[in-house]
Amino acid sequence: MIAASPGEGDAAERPVAGITAGARKRLAVPLATALGLAATMAPALAQGTGDAATIAELRRQLNDMQRQLSRFEAMQARLDQLEARVARQPAARAPAVAPVPVPQSRSATRNDVRAAQEAAREARAAADEAQAVSRGFAQATAALPAATAAAALSERTVAGLEPPEPMGRSFEDALRADLPGVAFRVPGTDTQVRLYGFAKVTGHLDLNGRNQSDAPLPGGIPLRGSPADQQGGEFTASARFSRFGVDTRTLTSWGTLETRIEGDFGGGTSANATFRLRQAWAELGTERFAVLAGQANSLWNEGLFETIIDATNLNQSFIRQAQIRVTARLGKGLTGQFSIEAPETQYTAAAGVFNPSSTLDGGASPAFNVMPDFLARLTYRSNGIELGARGMVRQLQIRPAGTAAGAPSGATSTTGWGLAAHARLPMRLISESFGPDELVGMAYYGEGIGRYFAGSTNGQDALSNIGMANVQGRVSLDATPAWGATLAYRRFWNTQFRSNFAYSYARQDFPSYALDFTPGSAAALSLNREVQQGFANLIWSPFAEVRNGVFGSGWLDVGLEYLYTRRDIAGGAAAAGAGKSGYGVANRFLFGAVARF
C-alpha cells in the first residue's frame, strides 16, 4: 500500500525506494558519457602499443558496462511508466488520527500497487548496480589508460625521463621531474625543465713572473728575464667562472628532444666579469640515434682529469663552437659520433698571429675559412673502463690579395688532420684495495690542429712566410706538426677527500724560416717548441657518496692545488731577444670553492 505524505508534490518527483527519477537520470547521463569517452579513448590509447591483451581486456570491460547500462535504462523506463499510472489517481490524504485502510480506486488496482513495489525494488537494485558499474568504470579509466599510455610511451622513454604522473592524483607528483637538481615538469605537457649551475670562487698566488690571468695558457707564461718575470708574482681572486644553464627534455614521437642554453661570466677579466654564451643547442633522438645542432662542446674536447684552475690546460681541449652532430650506438658499450663544426684558420707569420677576424695594418686578414672541420669519435665504456679514439680533417687557407701583406696574389691552402686516443682504467681491476681510484692516459699527433690544443700552441695551426723580405714566388702555408701525451692518476683517500696528479708534455716542429722571425717579436715568442705541465691537488667534498662503485661529489667542493709549467721557445735565447732566456717557468698555488645547484 502506497500512501502520500502531506505536502509532497507530484509522484514523478517523489522518492521511490530511495531514488528519484531525476537522480536516476542524473546518474545515467554521466555514466553513458563516461562509457562513450572510454570507448573513444580506447583506440587512441592502444594505437602503436602492440599490446593485444590490454586492448582486448579494455574492450571487454567496455562491452560489459554498456550491457549493464542498457539493462539499467530498461528498468528506468518501466519504473517511469508505472509511476505515471500511479500519478494519474487522486493523491490520498493522510488521516488526522490513526491510519485506517482506504479502499483503492478502480484506477489503482492491487496489481498496479504490487507492480510499482516490484519496480521500486528493481530500481533500487539497478541503482546499486549502476553505482557498482560507475565505480568499476572509474577504476578502469584510472588504471587501464595509465598502463596503456605507459606502454605507448615505453619505446620513446629514455633513462632519466619518465612519463608524467596522471594529473589529479597528486599535484606535486604531476609537476615533479625525473631530472636531477632544480627541475619541474610543465603542467599538461611531456616537457621537463631543469636549472643547473654553480657559484665558484678561485684565488691564486704566483711565485715567479707576474701573470694576472686567472686562466693562463701554459704556452704563454712569462719568459725568464722578461719585464713580467722581473716584477715577480702576485695574488688575484675571481668568481667570473660561475655558471648557470637551462636544460629541457620533451618526449616526442621521434624520441627525446633536449635543449640547453648555458653561460658564465668568463668573457672578461678577473676584475671585470662579462657574460658569455657557452652552449646553445638542441638534440633530438633516442639512445640508439640522435642529432644535435647548435653551439656545443667540440667532439675533439677531452677533460682528462680534475683541476681547480679554469684554464685550457696542456693537452686538453675546451673548444665550444657551432656544429651539427650525429650520435649512434654501434654496439654494447660502443658509441660512434660524427660532427661538422665551424672552422677557424689561424696562422703565424713575421707580422704576428692572425685569424679571419684579425686586422693587418688596419686592413683585412689574409686568413680564410673555406670549409667546415670534420670530426669523428669512437667511445667504449664497460665496467668502469673507458677507451676513446678521435680524429679530424680540416682545410686551412690564406688569401693575400686585398690585404696589406705585400705578397703575390692567389690563395694558398694546406690540409690539417689529427688523431688522438685515451684510456681510463679503474684501479680496482688490479686490486679492490684501490677503491674508485683511476689511471688515465692520452696521446695525440697531428698537423694543423693547433687551435684545438691552445694550451701549448697558443692556437696556431700553421706558419707562413707571407710578409718576409726574402719571399719569392708563391706564399707558403705550412701546417704545424704537433704531438703530446698526458698521464694522470686520481686518488681517493676516502669518500670525502681525493687528489689528482698529472704530467703533460707537448711539442711542435716548425719550418726553418721561423728562425728568421725578428728576435723578441710577438711571432718569435709565440713559437713554443716544448711545453711541460704538472698538477697536484687535494679536494674536499663533504657531501660526496659512492654508490655501486660510482663516485658523486655532491654539491660542494673545496680544494687546494699546485701547478708547475715550463715552456721552451723555438730558437732558444737567440729568438727571445736581448736579456731574455729562451724558456719560462711558473709556479702557482690555487684555492677554489664551488657550490652546485
Image: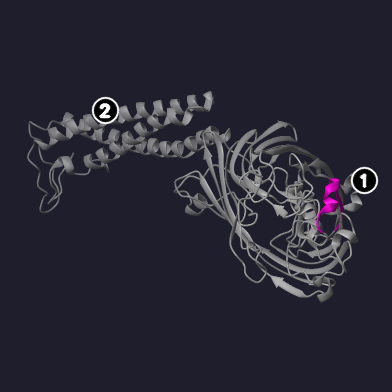
Asked if the residue at tag 1 contacts the one at tag 2, i.e. Cβ–Cβ closer than 8 Å, the answer is: no
* Residue 3 visible at all: yes
Question: Could you say where residue 437 lies in the image, as x and y percent from the top left?
Answer: 86, 52
Q: Residues within 10 Å of mark 1 (few under 14, many from 20)?
A: few
Q: Is residue 513 magenta?
A: yes
Q: Residue at x 48, y 27 (%)?
A: 47
From the viewer's perspective, tell me whether residue 28 is left or right of residue 235.
left
The first of marks 2 and 1 along the sequence is 2
Tell me the quarter of the picture where residue 42 sits. top left
From the viewer's perspective, tell me whether residue 522 is left or right of residue 75.
right
Label 1, on which residue? 430
From mark 2 to mark 1, how far is it between C-alphas? 80 Å
Label 2, on which residue? 74
Q: Residue at x 66, y 68 (%)?
A: 239
Magenta-drawn segment: 501-518
* Residue 381 visible at all: no
Tell me the quarter of the picture where residue 375 sits. top right
Quick check: 19 above or below 170?
A: above
Residue type of the residue flagged with mark 1: Ile
Circle on res. 241: none
Residue type of the residue flagged with mark 2: Ala
From the viewer's perspective, tell me whether residue 596 is left or right of residue 469.
left
Question: Could you say where residue 540 lies in the image, as x and y percent from the top left?
Answer: 78, 65
